[in-house]
Amino acid sequence: MPETETYHSETIYPVIASDIAMQGTKTIDSLNRLVDYSSLDYIDVPGHLLCPICQYPFVNPYTTKCGHTFCKECLIQALEPNVDLSVECRCPIDRRPLNRDYVEDIFPAPKIISNMVNDLVAYCPNKSRGCQFQDQRWLLQRHIKDVCDYALISCGGIKEDGSVCSQPTHRKFIMEERRIQRDYLLYGYSMLPPTNARLMYGSSNIHTKNNIKDSASSSESVETKDKSNSLKFDQPSKNNLHLNAIKDTKLYQKLASQDDMPLLELQEDIQIPCVHQESDCANGCGIKITKATKEAHNNIGCTKVMLSCEYCELQVAKPKLNLHFEQCPEMTISCSAKAYGCTWIGIRRDLEAEHQSKCHFIAMVPFLSKQDKKIELLEKENKSLRYHLDNISQSLANLPSFGNINRNDSVSSDSTTYSIETTESLGALPVLPVDLSMTNASISHMLMENDRLRADLDHLTTSLAELEMKQNTLFMQENFRNQEVMHSIKGMINTLRQQIHYILLEHRAFTTNSSNPVHIINQSSKVASTNPELLRRRLSDITRQDVKL
Amino acid sequence: MDICKRRLMKELSTAEKGLPSGLTLVSANDLTSWYIDITVDSNSLYQGQIYRLMFMYSPNYPMKVPNVQFVPDENRPIPIHPHIYANGHICLDILGDGWTPVQNTVSVCLSIQSMLAGNHTNERPPDNDSYVRSAPKYAQDSRFIYHDDSV
Ligand SMILES: [Zn+2]
Ligand SMILES: [Zn+2]
Ligand SMILES: [Zn+2]
Ligand SMILES: [Zn+2]
Ligand SMILES: [Zn+2]
Ligand SMILES: [Zn+2]
Ligand SMILES: [Zn+2]
């Protein structure tokens, strides 16, 4: 891509995030992560901007020559040739052959598409930790890098033993500490009125306000200042830290002149105590907390934070308040059949005592909820039917484009002439585009049918070839067996012939011997000399049999 | 990064919001295999009966087709259908060469559902016995010849 946009390009910025931190990773570098567009929690994504493969909004959209758009990553993987190149790579939607190595087959989608997906609004990836921020996805990187309260950054605080902590923590806690330190440095020595400070850091929390109070009072005398300081941190090493920092007049001037510069940029200048140091919960519940876990503990975990129920004035531990609300007898509630129209409102005790027996709506609840279930079922069914219908109409919509792309095919050129003919035959009548697309559709349907038949034919041919092979081997085997049988038969015939020959000779010798033994010699020599054909014929007979077998 | 995992997470979250009628997600404990119960009440052959489908996803899903077959238990038989073998293997083109990555678990279920809904032959495939005798464990490892699309 020759031109690169500055902000909409797919450049990925390093981001501080993730739960790697929870596994005790030490350095800030390993916390750097890229904002993964494909795992964001998007708000309201139009279906057209979802990749059909991964079903998330496009990341680096690529378009095919058949006009379908996917994430680059998804498309590349879908078009990965298999090992023996036996199967052609095809478009996942219309199965047109595509080669991922050809620039004319797949190429970056038009800029407008990437701009549209980059403008999609998503939650901050740190939503699960409590960040409520949402913005266009290309702006989230900046949010996490510079402002997100819940991004993980290296603590950088000074531990009790004087070393620098490198454990990660939420930016929020570091910022709080920095604010405290900065306000202390600023208002401990400058005469900025506290009201001003409050205006400037309206968003800052109680700690900051406390600190302002502290510093305002501490400006009166050095002793009180030191006292408040040590009260706040309870650690002598911190005190030294502060004094060191305060002595650095350069830093002080810098702070005083640019008091509204982004806090993060003060990072190198201000030293803060480590936020991971444990202390006992101030409420006395006995659990060790750190500055980083204090807020969560006070909100949900601490059993010593008692709240009085606003209805019955019972004292309930904070974690159990919601449970209490479910049964508080003095709580104002509406009738349990409110969804079906009862307008009664009163305290829970009255509901159980009087209203429940009188209310007509409550009596109807079983029936009505049954109806509700039925409606829900029907809606579900309707939804699945709609899904089917969508599928069908989508495949119908895809058909004409299929025909058009194949214009070079001989069959498709037929289709063009065919549609022209229909146009002519309709004459003066206005030709609706629907007609054309319908013809195209039916022709592409034919084409598909043709493809299918061809595939079937291929199957048949292969199975035919297989059958032929099988037949051949069978035939060969049969042949061998026959040959063997014939050999044995031949052997038998030979022995038979020899036996017959022997018997004949025996017989002849016997008959001549009985009449005239001398004559037989003559006769036999005579036979041998006068009848050579007989012998020769026999011989030839044998050879012929040999050949035959 | 991992398309397979992301895709299955997305499919799971959609499935948990509700599947089309006749489909119930039984379990998807790990992301590698799901069980889905399927009913086909529009066809009297299968009415009132629940069948169970098993989906097994390889790490390169959705680029590669998942292994899909019916699994029996005492209450869930294998449906009788000319394209479904007695061991639960299904002869369906989208579960073989016809697969494309734009298909998903629900679309496969719906295809199987409509395949059952449109059937009126109460028979196993003609080569059922010989196939079942020599079939591999997973249907995916068989190479079916897709007889016809009429059913
Ligand atoms: Zn395409
Ligand atoms: Zn994608
Ligand atoms: Zn955030
Ligand atoms: Zn620390
Ligand atoms: Zn506590
Ligand atoms: Zn109460
Ligand atoms: Zn009522």
Image: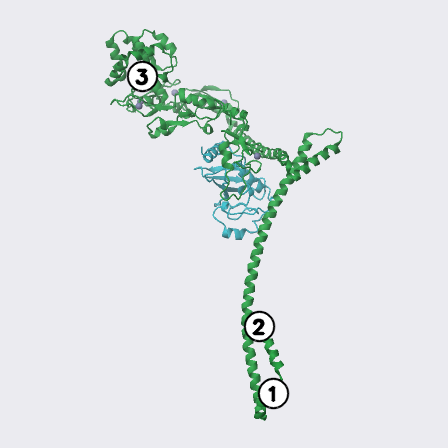
Chain colours: A green, B cyan
> In whole angstroms, how far apart are the C-alphas of marks 3 and 2?
115 Å
Residue underneath mark 1 = A526
Say what secondary structure mark 2 lies in. helix
Near mark 1 (Cα within 10 A), the count class, few <14, some 14-19 or many ≥20, is few
* Number of numbered tags placed on the structure image: 3
Residue A403, x across and y down, in percent: 64, 36
Chain ID of residue with mark 1? A
Q: Nearer the viewer, mark 1 or mark 2?
A: 1
Seen in the picture, residue A543 relative to A279 is either above or below; the reply is: below
Say what secondary structure mark 1 lies in. helix
Q: Are marks 1 and 2 in contact (CB under 8 Å)?
A: no
Chain ID of residue with mark 3? A
Residue A262, x across and y down, in percent: 38, 15
**Residue type (three-letter) at the residue carrying disc 1:** Lys
Q: Are marks 1 and 3 in contact (CB under 8 Å)?
A: no
Q: Are marks 3 and 2 in contact (CB under 8 Å)?
A: no
Q: Nearer the viewer, mark 3 or mark 2?
A: 2
Chain ID of residue with mark 2? A
Residue underneath mark 2 = A546
Cβ of mark 1 under 8 A from ligand 1: no
B42 or A15, which is in the foreground? Answer: A15
Residue underneath mark 3 = A270
A21 or A471, which is in the foreground? Answer: A471
Same chain assignment for discs 1 and 3: yes
- Left or right of B43 on screen, residue A177: left
Which image quadrant is residue A455 in? Answer: top right
> In whole angstroms, how far apart are the C-alphas of marks 1 and 3?
144 Å
